[in-house]
Image (spheres, rainbow, N blue to C red):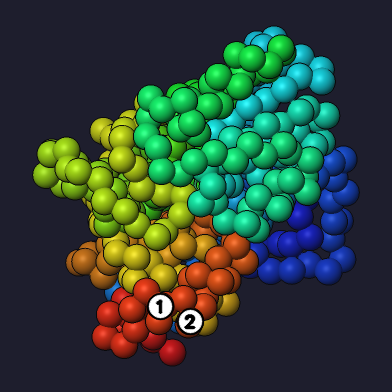
């Protein structure tokens, strides 16, 4: 496989070192750059007795972990004949899935219609539009069952549009399958077959379910750890067995007020609820100390991973993810003015991250 021939070799400690004379692959299309993302160890922040590694899903071509399922869901629909040449793909999405679908659609010549609640960040709308997607803005303040609710509107647009399919990532088996076939095996390979825990968030549940299913068979000792925003129903449900009323949170892309059908909660071994200020601080410190630029959900995962690592008595090898790039969140996570406006400063932001250098 061309992608394996990276311009790097492996040093004695297992880390890759640049080899400036090696063959650098030439890709047929940008879609060939989806997946095979690098893993980087955390070395300047205290991880207790554990070693913590982050997989940079921000390196995917539209900038997030959702490129993998976006391509997989479109290609599954092509294979089963539902999506024909020049066909139309509809999805209800407030973020990265839409960008992934828009990228794949641009390359493959499909019409992409994204139904988007009107609170979605302007940068993401402009990015999706620039990739050629059509954006249908709808109300954010209505719930399931209302014809203007983004999921219901996407379903009705699909019915009214000849040759259209509704991707529906929350129920689409190709979503977790893409992580079972790519993200999971890549992590185990990059960790030389030795990984004790993987810390994931849940938006649709595709990442956690896919990686968890792969590890259940290929590395049964690997524990799946849920990183969930405070306000989401998932961590309380795992920790107490009780359904709670959902609250609200500022972190984007993860946390749920329902249980998506692609999510297999039985795969979860531990769960942490992380507050918005903790998530934002963790993302900022990750950039400042390690130079790794992740978004708000990356902050939630990183804060939960640090908690898990520091609670361990025995040394463990832990992996988490940089779900998308911090560039989409410069005016929120990385803005002092925004944090001050939210009233987060001083003591509230201290203590999440401890330096070791
Ligand atoms: N982080 C971000 C920024 C996301 O957009 C998403 C997808 N909503 C996730 C994490 C979680 O991924 P999944 O849908 O696989 O649960």
Does dot 1 land on a helix, a strand or a loop? helix
| Coordinates of residue 75 in the picture (x, y in percent) | 68, 24
Does 196 sit above or below residue 332?
above
Say which of 66 and 142 sits in front. 142
Residue positioned 43% across, 65% down in the render: 299
Q: Is mark 2 within 8 Å of ligand 1?
A: no
Residue 256 visible in image: yes
Asked if the residues shown at circle 1 and circle 2 are in contact, with their CB atoms under 8 angstroms apart, the answer is: yes
Q: Is residue 217 left or right of residue 152?
A: left
Quarter placement of the N terminus: top right
Q: Quadrant of residue 52?
A: bottom left
| Coordinates of residue 25 in the picture (x, y in percent) | 84, 51
Q: Residues within 10 Å of mark 1 (few under 14, many from 20)?
A: few
Does 340 sit above or below residue 121?
below
| Count of marks placed on residues | 2
Q: Which label number is shown at residue 341?
A: 1
Residue positioned 40% across, 60% down in the render: 250
Q: Is residue 143 left or right of residue 90?
A: left
Residue 192 visible in image: no
Q: Quadrant of residue 316?
A: bottom left
| Coordinates of residue 180 in the picture (x, y in percent) | 50, 33
Determine which residue is flagged by label 2.
337
Does dot 2 land on a helix, a strand or a loop? helix
Residue positioned 26% across, 70% down in the render: 310
Say which of 337 and 29 sits in front. 337
| Coordinates of residue 53 in the picture (x, y in percent) | 47, 63
């Amino acid at each position: 496989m061309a992608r394996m021939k990276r311009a790097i070799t492996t040093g004695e400690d297992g880390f890759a070192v640049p080899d400036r004379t090696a063959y650098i692959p030439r890709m047929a299309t940008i879609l060939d750059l989806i997946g095979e993302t690098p893993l980087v160890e955390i070395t300047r922040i205290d991880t207790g007795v554990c070693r913590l590694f982050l997989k940079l899903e921000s390196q995917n071509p539209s900038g997030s972990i959702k490129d993998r399922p976006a391509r997989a869901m479109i290609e599954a629909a092509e294979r089963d004949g539902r999506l024909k040449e020049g066909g139309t793909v509809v999805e209800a999405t407030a973020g990265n899935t839409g960008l992934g679908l828009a990228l794949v659609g641009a390359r493959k010549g499909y019409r992409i219609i994204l139904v988007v609640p009107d609170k979605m960040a302007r940068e993401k709308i402009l990015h999706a539009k620039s990739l050629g997607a059509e954006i249908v803005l709808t109300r954010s303040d209505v719930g399931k069952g209302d014809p203007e609710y983004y999921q219901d509107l996407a379903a009705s647009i699909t019915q009214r549009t000849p040759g259209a399919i509704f991707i529906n990532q929350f129920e689409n088996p190709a979503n977790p399958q893409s992580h079972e076939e790519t993200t999971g095996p890549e992590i185990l390979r990059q960790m030389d077959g030795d990984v004790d825990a993987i810390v994931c968030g849940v938006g649709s549940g595709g990442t956690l379910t896919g990686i968890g299913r792969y590890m259940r068979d290929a590395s049964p000792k690997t524990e799946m750890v849920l990183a969930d925003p405070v306000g989401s129903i998932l961590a309380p449900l795992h920790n107490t067995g009780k359904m709670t009323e959902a609250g609200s949170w500022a972190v984007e892309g993860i946390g749920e007020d329902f249980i998506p059908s692609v999510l297999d909660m039985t795969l979860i071994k531990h769960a942490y609820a992380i507050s918005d200020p903790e998530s934002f601080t963790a993302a900022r410190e990750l950039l400042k100390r390690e130079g790794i630029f992740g978004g708000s959900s990356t902050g939630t995962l990183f804060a939960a991973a640090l908690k898990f690592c520091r609670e361990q008595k025995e040394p463990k090898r832990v992996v988490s993810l940089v779900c998308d790039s911090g560039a989409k969140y410069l005016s929120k996570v990385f803005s002092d003015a925004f944090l001050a406006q939210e009233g987060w400063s001083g003591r509230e932001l201290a203590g999440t991250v401890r330096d070791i250098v």
